[in-house]
Image (tube, rainbow, N blue to C red):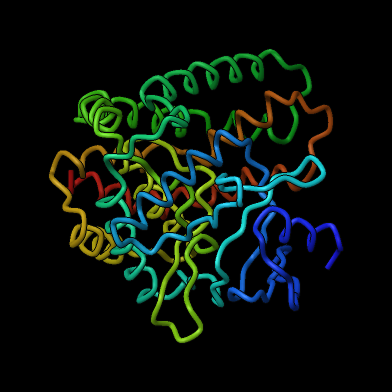
């Protein structure tokens, strides 16, 4: 371990490093006060301060959220060579294996617990939420139409241009359907309620953020860098969307996810309608579309085409699942 990090631990946390090793790019350090994990944090200080308040709020409610160890000055981070570092208690663990149905459902129930606890957070360091999705969807649809017009005027369309042209109608219909569902649902009220009640989302509730202890009995939730005040159903929709990327997703499993989530955070019929709108929006395809054409790439690699085609190839199974999800709503 570099002497600079040893000095950081001593000067910022009053801890002496007895031994150490590297794991996932972090330092695992044995100190006289137990084993700690020193991590680089690329967020700006205001974001770290809000994240610290969110973590402590969850932990105070009994939720298994990883928390930062405060530095001697009281801040939840320390500073070394233009980089922020945070310190936590070391939790020997591995990422949740969400390819297994038992783990997928266990973590769905945990997400419900998270959302039940993730409210009433009043932080002076609050960061802006992700914004109203109705406004966001409208913006992306306008951009999509402009891109389509640009492609139509192209003399020599690229491989990606051709993919977009061939699938434009399908994805436009899905995006507009998602927008229509949200506009005619409780989403606007939920968005206002989330802000008023300071309900927040994790923003990245996936396998790497869900740490399972070596004996499989304990769980710790990490990676709160994207947490923000927002409609909590967005977390649930992302969790289900990741499952839908599987080669053979089943609607019965989605129903089980909703059941397990609902055990700790009940879902109403209006909630299901909002959720159906969130799942209808072709998030990945629209994200790729925006990234690709905003960068105005001259050369189109095979890898870029492959990413678009992965979305296109998922259309049949996504449609099969969405038809059943719409019936729930």
- Left or right of 73: which side holds 6? right
- Tally of marks: 0
Assign the N terminus to one quadrant of the image: bottom right
- Residue 201 x %, y %: 38, 44
Residue furthest toward the right? Answer: 3
Please name whichever residue, 200 or 156, is drawn nearer the observer in this view of the structure. 200
Q: Quadrant of residue 111?
A: bottom left
- Residue 55 x %, y %: 43, 51
Please name whichever residue, 58 or 208, is drawn nearer the observer in this view of the structure. 58
Instruction: Name above or below for residue 315 compared with residue 177.
Output: below
Instruction: Name above or below for residue 5 compared with residue 136.
Output: below
Instruction: Name above or below for residue 26 compared with residue 234.
Output: below
Residue furthest toward the left? Answer: 269
Assign the C terminus to one quadrant of the image: top left
Please name whichever residue, 132 or 307, is drawn nearer the observer in this view of the structure. 132
- Residue 146 x %, y %: 58, 14
Q: Residue at x 68, y 31 (%)?
A: 292
Residue furthest toward the bottom? Answer: 215
Please name whichever residue, 175 or 197, is drawn nearer the observer in this view of the structure. 197
Q: Residue at x 56, y 48 (%)?
A: 76
Q: Quadrant of residue 135?
A: top left
Q: Residue at x 25, y 37 (%)?
A: 274
- Left or right of 9: which side holds 271? left
Q: Residue at x 72, y 45 (%)?
A: 79
- Residue 323 x %, y %: 28, 47
- Left or right of 26: which side holds 113? left
């Amino acid at each position: 371990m570099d002497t600079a990090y040893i000095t950081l631990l001593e000067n910022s946390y009053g801890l002496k490093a007895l031994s150490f090793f590297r794991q996932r790019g972090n330092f695992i350090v044995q100190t006289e006060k137990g084993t700690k994990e020193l991590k680089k944090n690329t967020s700006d200080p205001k974001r770290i301060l809000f994240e610290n308040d969110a973590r402590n709020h969850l932990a105070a409610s009994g939720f298994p959220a990883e928390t930062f160890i405060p530095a001697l000055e009281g801040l939840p981070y320390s500073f070394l060579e233009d980089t922020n570092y945070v310190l936590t208690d070391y939790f020997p663990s591995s990422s949740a294996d969400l390819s297994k149905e038992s783990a997928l459902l266990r973590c769905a129930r945990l997400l419900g617990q998270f959302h039940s606890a993730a409210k009433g957070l009043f932080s002076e360091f609050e960061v802006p939420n992700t914004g109203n999705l109705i406004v966001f969807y409208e913006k992306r649809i306008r951009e999509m139409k402009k891109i389509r017009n640009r492609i139509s005027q192209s003399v020599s369309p690229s491989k990606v241009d051709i993919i977009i042209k061939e699938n434009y109608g399908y994805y436009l219909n899905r995006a507009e359907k998602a927008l229509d569902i949200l506009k005619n649902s409780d989403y606007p009220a939920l968005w206002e309620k989330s802000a008023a009640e300071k309900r927040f989302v994790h923003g990245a509730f996936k396998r790497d953020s869900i740490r399972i202890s070596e004996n499989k009995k304990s769980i710790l939730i990490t990676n709160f860098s994207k947490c923000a005040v927002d409609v909590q159903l967005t977390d649930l929709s992302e969790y289900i969307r990741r499952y839908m990327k599987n080669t053979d997703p089943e609607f019965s499993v989605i129903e089980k996810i909703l059941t397990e989530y609902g055990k700790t955070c009940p879902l109403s019929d209006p909630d299901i309608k909002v959720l159906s709108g969130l799942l209808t929006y072709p998030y990945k395809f629209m994200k790729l579309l925006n990234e690709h054409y905003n960068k105005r790439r001259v050369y189109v690699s095979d890898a870029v085409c492959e990413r678009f085609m992965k979305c296109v190839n998922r259309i049949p199974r996504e449609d099969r699942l969405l038809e059943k999800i719409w019936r729930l709503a």
